[in-house]
Amino acid sequence: MKPFFLILRPLWRVIAAVLTVGGYSVLLILLKDYFTTSIVALLYLVPVVVSAAFWGGLAGITASILSFLIFNYYFLHPVYTFAVSQPQDILAMFVLLGVAMLISNLMARAQQRLQLVQAREREMRQLYELSAALTGQTDARRVMHILAQRLETIFPGTVAEIQVDTAGMRFAIREPDEPVQHPAANPVRVPLYASRGQIGQIVLYGHANVISLDQERLLQTCASQGAVALERAILAENETRARVLEESDKLKTAILSSVSHELRTPLATIQASATSLFNPDVEFDPEARGELQALLIEEVEHLTQLVGNLLNMSRIEAGALKLQCQWNSLAEIVDTAMRRLRRSAARQRIEVDVADDLPLVYVDQVLMEQVFVNLIGNSLKFAPPETPIRVSALLEGASMQVTVSNQGPPIPAEHIGHIFEKFYLIPGMDSMRGTGLGLSICQGIVEAHGGKIWAENLEKGVAFRFSLPNVSQDNLAGLLPEEEE
């Protein structure tokens, strides 16, 4: 049933046309001594045009008939009667009526066409805004939110609910979130069809039960655009999940390959050494026994470092790396790392230039030791025998700059930006012992401290540099020159 104001709307338009013709007639009656009858007949076309243009065809017809009657009553002799004395006056009256009706009809059609064009323009603008809002969206829930908001803007007084039911996804989103009284509304349901069939539906509550045919067509078009955007977002999410699974498989393969290769050699060495040492049929002199025991300890330490790297990498990847920071001396951290590397570094010359009076740094001592162990251990793998490995630290502004350099082969320019990635091995150097995790772990630890790490090729060799921003301000104050008063 139509609302009461919709029923009264045509009546108000007719009344407006009557008032227009009445007011206009009063003006013409007052000025009739200045116009001929033919001029008055032409002037009566003005209220007809105005009524048809502003209030539609029915108002125009009403104005035409009323103008015809008033013209006859007040302007044709004998006046104040509907009788007509001259035949030409009869012709003038009916010409006036015919022209007025024709103009009224033409103006009404023009008004209808204008309203239709404006409605189409409004629909096109709404569809364009919906399309622009959905373009580039790759999150299905975000697409549903945008679609619901736009539908509620296009159809005022409604509440839109978007329901999706497709492979791997089943949920509904309604904007706004206040509860909807379902029994009080006759919902309109429009399916969402994609290339693979129906993936959901749009449900409009509220005043959707009085939706017009044009609005239904607009709703269907919005549903088509929404279905395309939803399908695109769902495909993008599926592609992302597939890519993550693929990367996960690659990561697992790389871990198994690297770790199995890295574990095989020390385990074989440990097994051979332990078998020899505990073989009662073999007697070793003290020097040979000491070498086997040292080899056992060295390989156990290597395995311990490997397991520590794997654990640290898993914590970094999971975002669970928790720092236990305290004020520490960088020189003491380097000394501890050197003690851990004393056996593997026995055949290499390591020069340490880290002053004891440097300001304290606010770091996790254990993790920072791991950074030095990994960087120095990496240099031990690639530095030529008998060449020095240099560890230095200096204060630059309010940050500590640390450098670990060696005289090994330079890193090719196309690879220097990738060496901190997990399991990245430079082609031609992948035969060197290692998992490709050491530098990646260094990067994770340094960045967790708010610092930055990078690699540079030197004139002779390679340098790994990193910065630590948290330097003790108390110690720093004593190193800075006093300001002149």
Image (cartoon, rainbow, N blue to C red):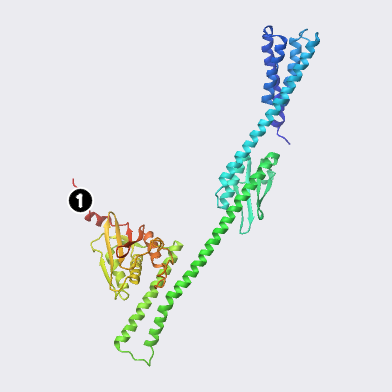
- In the rendered image, the quadrant that contains the C terminus is top left
Residue 83 in view: no
Residue 274: % across, % down: 39, 84
Residue 332, quarter of the rendered image: bottom left
Residue 118: % across, % down: 64, 33
Residue 161: % across, % down: 63, 48
Residue positioned 43% across, 78% down in the render:
264
User: Looking at this view, is 55 or 336 the one in front?
Assistant: 55
Amino acid type of the residue that numbered disc 1 sits on in the rendered structure: Glu
- In the rendered image, the quadrant that contains the N terminus is top right
Q: How many marks?
A: 1
Residue 91: % across, % down: 79, 14
Residue positioned 38% across, 84% down in the render:
273
Residue 152, quarter of the rendered image: top right
Taking the view exactly as shown, the residue that stands out farthest to the bottom is: 281
Name the side, left or right, on which 210 lies relative to 452: right
Task: Indicate the secondary structure of the residue bearing disc 1.
Answer: loop
Q: Residues within 10 Å of mark 1 (few under 14, many from 20)?
A: few
Name the side, left or right, on which 378 lies relative to 50: left
Name the side, left or right, on which 324 lies relative to 42: left
Vertical position of residue 114 compared to residue 412: above or below: above
Residue 88, quarter of the rendered image: top right
Residue 389 in view: yes
Vertical position of residue 208 compared to residue 286: above or below: above
User: Looking at this view, is 161 or 233 the one in front?
Assistant: 233
From the image, tell me which residue sits under label 1. 482
